[in-house]
Image (tube, grey):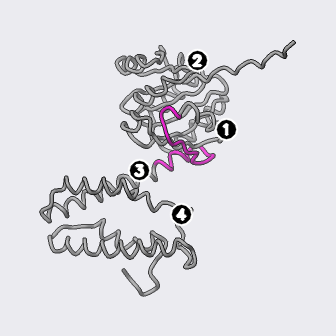
Amino acid sequence: MSEPSDPQPEPIRLGYVGLGNIGGPMAGSLAAWSGGLTVFDLSADAIAKVVEKGATAADSLADLASTTDIIGICVLDDDQVRTVVSGPDGLLATARPGTVITVHSTIGPDTAADLAEQCAAREVTLLDAPISGGAMGAASGRLAIMVGGPRAAYEKLKEPFALTADMLVHAGPEVGAGTRMKLARNLLHFISFTATTEAARLAEAAGLDITKLGKVVRHSDAVTGGAGAIMLRETTAAVDADDPWYGILTGVRTLGEKDLSLALALGNELGVDLPLGQIALRDLAAGLGVPHPQGESA
């Protein structure tokens, strides 16, 4: 007589709240999950689009939480996240012990930590899991998701979230770590946007076609990796002279300071103010970890 086989574990059931420009396509990808997806939004049209892809509509947040195991949230701001999670008719009203809530909205790290404490009192785990890649990444299933919170809960996300993200990163064991990583990433993002406008003003003053400049920038960044190409070290401390990175980064410093100096000279000639360029020339060496020796300047 053959031994009885162990019963198969119940498939993880997914839930999703907030079906806007990013949450909608993200949920649309998750609708293919074998354990099923239940969604909730205040917009009937937004719900209908995801239901067409195989999701089930919930009547309320409480209804959704009572039938799901991992619940994603992508709403506007801290207040909306608080309402969804811990409001009078929020997810915690019916979420069962063991439920994992992932907050994809970019909120304050303290908000995430506070909500995680409230959830823990109900034996529910809340992770902050902000996303990078925008609507385009959500539509193509190429999001990066930065997760803060217990490693065991993070591990539960890997298989289902592979449907919507091709990069899932455990930012740290504390709730709030994912949000801090997202804020650092977006600091670079929007400073670079501002730098882009500065470069465009210089090019325009020089009589150049700035749309062609944009094509060159996108092409070369696709090859070199853009600003992220130098983010390979484990520390921002100064580099020792015998470190293999020293020669590489001093080369970057030399090239960068030369090109920044030439660009600033062109700006002076054309009467274009380039404050970010001046800051970059001033801070590039120290920022790279290869400051000039005392008394030597760029």
Which secondary structure lies at badge 2?
A: loop
| Rendered location of residue 57, percent (x, y) | 46, 15
Q: Which mark is residue 152?
A: 1
On the image, numbered disc 2 is attached to which residue? 67
Which secondary structure lies at badge 1?
A: helix
Instruction: Decide: few, some or many residues near mark 1? Use Cα within 10 Å; few <14, some 14-19, many ≥20.
Output: few
Q: Amino acid at mark 3?
A: Asn
Which secondary structure lies at badge 3?
A: helix
**Label 2 or label 1, whichever comes before in sequence order:** 2
Q: Quadrant of residue 155?
A: top right
**Label 4 or label 3, whichever comes before in sequence order:** 3
Measure the alpha-carbon separation of dots 1 and 4: 27 Å
On the image, numbered disc 3 is attached to which residue? 186
Q: Of 33 and 281, which appears nearest the observer?
A: 33
Measure the alpha-carbon separation of dots 4 and 3: 19 Å
Q: Residue furthest top?
A: 1
Instruction: Assess whether mark 4 and mark 1 are in contact (beta carbons under 8 angstroms).
Output: no
Q: Of 182 and 30, which appears nearest the observer?
A: 30
Instruction: Decide: few, some or many residues near mark 4? Use Cα within 10 Å; few <14, some 14-19, many ≥20.
Output: few
Q: Amino acid at mark 4?
A: Arg
Whether 139 is drawn above or below 170: the answer is above
**Label 2 or label 4, whichever comes before in sequence order:** 2
The boundaries of the magenta stretch are: 162-182
Which secondary structure lies at badge 4?
A: loop
Measure the alpha-carbon separation of dots 2 and 4: 44 Å
| Rendered location of residue 254, percent (x, y) | 38, 76
Instruction: Decide: few, some or many residues near mark 2? Use Cα within 10 Å; few <14, some 14-19, many ≥20.
Output: some
Measure the alpha-carbon separation of dots 1 and 3: 27 Å
